[in-house]
Amino acid sequence: MPVVDAETLPKDERERSLAACRVLEEGKILMFRETPLEIPTADREFLLRQRQTEAGYHKNIAYRPGSDRVTGVARQQELDARELKRVLRDYSRAAAAFASTLLAPYAAKWRLDYASFRPQEEAGRKLSRHARNDLLHVDSFPTRPTKGDRIFRFFTNVNPATPRVWKTGETFPELAERFAVSSGLLGKVSRTGPFPVVTKLLRHSRPPYDEFMHRFHNFLKDNLAYQDNARSETVSFPPFATWMVFTDMVTHAVLSGQYALEQTFLIARDSLVTPEKAPVAVLERLAGKELTN
Ligand SMILES: [Fe+2]
């Protein structure tokens, strides 16, 4: 089963932390059937009311803890935008506080990335192929290279009535074994140096690892044979459940659901409990060289 119920973790705090890190690094989804975070009823109700203005929304509404800013809210009432920022800031802080105990080995070195609110119904969304959430993929951040660090996400379903439904399948090591070399992607990125990347506002470069992960994300979404035949299971996250997962490891696709909160963490490679299982380690073994320069 891809989902581990948090009820089954050891009770002793230290053992619990290590067990949680281990199951997550193995490629499991850790789920709390009832969220361990306190999200006030008034905040939940506020989030559910956001549907009225959905026409103006971008893919997600993002909160950036570093600069305390919200992006992706278009033409909102100023009052709503301010309240949304407060609700997301509180979620971000609560998720980080909870994770710093549960996942103590990571906390000293992680980087708190964006939090997000996903107010749109996922079933039937019209997004470009590479932006689609309903195709199996592993995550990569094209404009924010992780250099081998891990993408870890902490979700809460704030919908009081409807589950959030995912499809999840093979983990990164299995996929890498099948596709990394045969697709030609690993050979291409490990032969060349850092890849120049030009985006609208900044010019930077991606190390071979990040270049691979970015291309691999697109390769999986473009690969119709893979999408049609991939071994996968449907998992359902009930109302008010919290779940967490290394999304650079676990293939996932969102089939349906509306109103989820999420906080992303970038977990340092050298704080992992089983670093040999990280995607970067898997790829470096296959390539026979370092991929993060
Ligand atoms: Fe994803």
Image (spheres, rainbow, N blue to C red):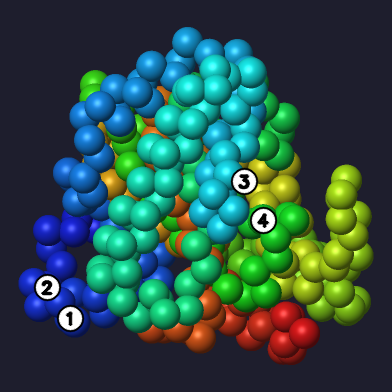
Query: Which dot, 4 or 3, sits closer to the camera?
Result: 4
> Which residue in the protein does label 4 denote?
141
Q: Residue at x 31, y 76 (%)?
A: 104
The answer to the question of whether label 1 and label 2 lie on touching residues, with beta carbons closer than 8 A, is yes
Q: CA distance from mark 2 to mark 3?
A: 37 Å
Tell which residue pokes out farthest to the left in this image.
Answer: 11
Amino acid at the residue labelled 1: Glu
Nearer to us in this view, 90 or 169: 90
The disc, 2 or 3, on the residue closer to the chain's N-terminal end is 2
Ranked by sequence position, the earlier of labels 4 and 3 is 4
Dot 2, crowdedness within 10 Å: few (<14), some or many (≥20)?
A: some
Assign a secondary structure to mark 1: helix
For the residue labelled by badge 3, is the local secondary structure a helix, a strand or a loop?
helix
* Mark 4 to mark 3 CA distance (whole Å): 22 Å
Which residue has dot 3 on it? Answer: 226
Q: Could you say where residue 274 lies in the image, as x and y percent from the top left?
A: 41, 83
Badge 1 local density, few (<14 within 10 Å), some, or many (20+)? few
In the picture as drawn, the residue positioned furthest to the top comes out as 52
| Quarter of the figure with the C terminus | bottom right
What residue is rendered at 19% in x and 55% in y?
Answer: 5
Check residue 10 in the rendering and tell me which mark sits there, or answer none: 2
Sequence-first tag of 3 and 1: 1
Give amino acid for label 3: Tyr
Kindly identify which residue carries mark 1: 15
- Residue 91 coordinates in the image, percent (x, y): 36, 46
**Residue 29 vertical position relative to residue 228 in the rendered view, above or below:** below
| x 70%, y 60%: residue | 144
